[in-house]
Image (tube, rainbow, N blue to C red):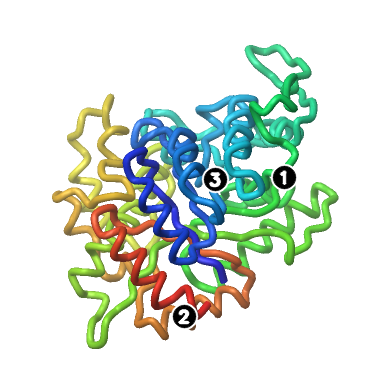
Amino acid sequence: MDIGVCVASHVGDIDYVVRAEELGYSHAWLADSQMLWSDCYAALALVADRTSTINIGTGVSVSGTRPAPVTAASIATINALAPGRTFLGLGTGNTAMRIMGHKPQRIAEFDQYLEAIKPLLKGEEAEHSFGGHVSPIRHIMPDKGFVNFEDPIPLYVSGFGPKSLALAGKHADGAVLSIPPDTQAMDRTWEMIERGAAEAGRELDRENYLTCSLTTIVVLEDGETIESPRVKAEAGAMAMASVHYSYDQYRQLGRSPGSRLDDIWDEYTSMLADYDPERIHQRIHAGHNCWVIPEEERFVTPELIDATCIVGTASEVIERLQQLEERGLDQLMILPNFDPRFEVLERIGQEIIPHV
């Protein structure tokens, strides 16, 4: 199994990806969220200049904030800087859109977006809809060095539910997941991907289709347990992001958060009940996937971490990764808390990557 790294895009933190390359990480997925981090394509250009072997791309770019020709030109520009190792991860914007007070792009719109961007990533003509008008478009100077369509740009579609995963099966070269790190979830995920491919008349080859899931890994020391403060310090932000997501689902769609949040849900929702409703979208994702803000520390329980992250001794982590790989997961990308990110990068690079 490959291990990649998801990066909170930061134009001043390129050394992090450089070190990931040195340690043998396979991919660097730079996150795209306009109201959280640096622009992912600006950061990717800097990463391309300072690396030579690691695969680089978006983790994931947001269809709702970037029209298809903009995304295609952006990633093709990166492909000119890092030919043969550039990929495009693409999603509807579960965080990026909601943090601006909007819902992610609808599935039908995302389907149309994917139909348009596939030929554009090859430098071919596509039908593009804008302002109610549809017109054929293509990059008209693809051979002048501005962009690179000669080296293929793999398309990986992010999906959380059956409809988006079906689109990943229909359109993409791989699927970007955020599933609980267990084998049963992987089985269900493959069913949804392959159902979407079959409905589109596509025969999917698992050997040539990338599956990658977002989580983080904490390698325990001898005698250390999941209750260790270090575990929360390294994985708490990832665990808490799952609560943010559940709250958005509850607030906008009325969906139940599930039993894993039973112990904290009432207290968490009460904490947010009196927040300014016009700005609640700014508050929900505070610290998103980087830090746990002080008033949310109490919600990061060992049970929540266990449900969203992979925690164990080196041998236990390696065994779990091997089990996931046997069920069809090709890669895990890690996103640890921001402050200890280099320490986590080193530990996994030295204790896990050489053995998987």
Q: Which residue is mark 1?
A: 152
* Element at label 1: loop
Q: Residues within 10 Å of mark 1 (few under 14, many from 20)?
A: some
State the image coordinates of residue 206 (x, y, percent, origin top left).
73, 65
Q: Which residue is mark 2?
A: 318
Q: Amino acid at mark 1?
A: Pro
Between discs 1 and 3, the one toward the N terminus: 3
* Element at label 2: helix
Question: What residue appears at the point 54 percent right and 38 percent down from the top-left corner?
Answer: 92
Question: Could you say which quadrant of the image residue 325 lies in?
Answer: bottom right
Query: Mark 2 and 3 residues: CB-CB less than 8 Å, in contact?
Result: no
Question: What residue appears at the point 25 percent right and 50 percent down from the top-left corner?
Answer: 291
Mark 2 to mark 3 CA distance (whole Å): 26 Å
Q: Nearer the viewer, residue 266 or 129?
A: 129
Query: Mark 1 and 3 residues: CB-CB less than 8 Å, in contact?
Result: no
State the image coordinates of residue 138 (x, y, percent, origin top left).
75, 22
Q: Which residue is mark 3?
A: 57
Between discs 1 and 2, the one toward the N terminus: 1
Question: What residue appears at the point 72 percent right and 36 percent down from the top-left corner?
Answer: 149
Mark 1 to mark 3 CA distance (whole Å): 13 Å
In this picture, residue 156 sits left or right of residue 150: left
Question: What residue appears at the point 49 percent right and 52 percent down from the top-left corner?
Answer: 28
The mark closer to the camera, 2 or 3, is 3
Q: Amino acid at mark 3?
A: Gly
In this picture, residue 171 sits left or right of residue 245: right
Question: Which quadrant, please, contains the N terminus?
Answer: bottom right
* Element at label 3: strand
State the image coordinates of residue 18 (x, y, percent, origin top left).
42, 54
